[in-house]
Image (cartoon, rainbow, N blue to C red):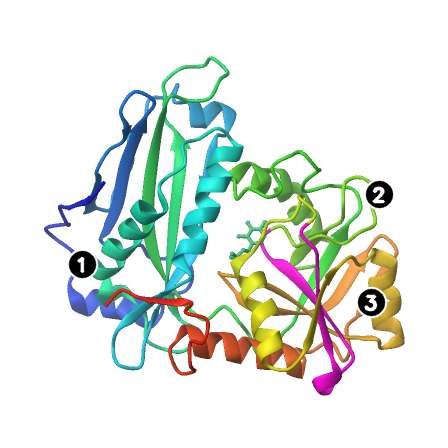
Amino acid sequence: MKVINNPNKSPLASVERDQRVSEPGFGKYYTDNMVIAQWSEVDGWQDAELKAYGPLTLDPATMVFHYGQEVFEGMKAYSQPDGGISLFRPEANAKRFAKSAARIALPEMPVDFFVKTVEELVKQEKGWVPKKIGESLYLRPFLIATEVGLGVRPSNHATYVLIATPAAAYFNAAKAVTVWISTEYVRAALGGTGEAKCGGNYAASLLAQKQAAQEGCDQVAYIDAKERKWVEEMGGMNLYFIKGSGKDATIMTPKLTGTLLPGITRDSILTLAKDLGYKTEESMISIDQWRDGVKSGEITEIFACGTAAVISAVGAAKSAQGTWQTGDGKPGVITNEIRAALLAIQHGTAPDKHGWNKRVI
Ligand SMILES: *Cc1c(COP(=O)(O)O)cnc(C)c1O
């Protein structure tokens, strides 16, 4: 399968584009082009087409509108010191995309084909990649069920779409986020779709998000569905807990029990923290251990991680039981160190020992 290049014949004037790239926000502006590929049960995957960004026209009876069969990815292209552009671990996104699709009975897109579509769009949109550290071109590949019909069964037609949006640095070094630990709503149960990056998981999480906002919190942290006490993740980011300080610190993250989304940032940090000389641990932490740990000072820092925000410090947690601050409530030194180390690799200013960067240009 290849990508047929049929780019937008009237892209945005470069002056205007540069203006947008200099103040990108997040998801505010979309680039001139997108990539679309079709799959059908009969013919399999067809060649993709890179073409002008624009609306999709779909029959109202298209299956995705009714039964929510959709999966997506989130990944970034980073500008490099020599003017080139790199993707960060795109094969990992490709593999997860295929796994997510399989879980909700959508077709698995071959890894090479997926990566090719991303590379082609980034090459085409190189003028849209911001240059400052922390900034990037955010790529959003997604796959939807596009058979027309209301019968409940796996769609025999699927459409892959890839769009891109320039992204500012999400992180506010001075500000840590506050999380609402939801004891009422659950994100995922064993045997469900918690491991798949599907829109349905997000739909199920929005009410808890609304509740968090009403409680004055920025994000939601979810606990397990069965015992209702083990901390899982934030619904869009994985969590890390730091015990101790200095080089004796242990960097701990909840283990992948089958209900957590296996984040690529989470995985990269496990490796990176070891490189930086820290002990790492994948285990379990209960809400009580979280509360007692920050109160006793055993837990010194907490952060959330994911492609979009990279790393956000968690300054305080609030639940039905009360509010607990982490340390002094500000982003901690190890959180900042890990964030800087990861960004340095992504932006090509530190050696890429693990071969994570894939040069596009
Ligand atoms: C995407 C996502 C993450 C973070 O994954 P990354 O690969 O690090 O971006 C964490 N949790 C959920 C539910 C997600 O959808």
Tags 1 and 2 touching, CB below 8 Å: no
Q: Secondary structure at mark 1?
A: loop
Residue 61: x, y in percent?
A: 39, 18
Q: Secondary structure at mark 2?
A: loop
Of marks 3 and 2, the one in the foreground: 2
Residue plotted at (16% across, 56% down)? 11
Say which amino acid is labelled 3.
Trp
**Mark 2, residue position:** 227
**Mark 1, residue position:** 12
Q: Which residues are magenta?
A: 236-256
Of marks 1 and 3, the one in the foreground: 3
Q: Label for residue 324?
A: 3
The extreme bottom residue here reads: 246
Is 101 within the magenta? no
Q: Please identify the quarter of the rendering in which residue 215 is found.
A: bottom right
Q: Does residue 174 appear anywhere in the picture?
A: no
Say which amino acid is labelled 2.
Glu
Q: Please identify the quarter of the rendering in which residue 91 is found.
A: bottom left
Residue 286: x, y in percent?
A: 83, 56
Badge 3 or badge 2: first in the primary sequence: 2
Query: What quarter of the picture does the C terminus occupy?
Result: bottom left
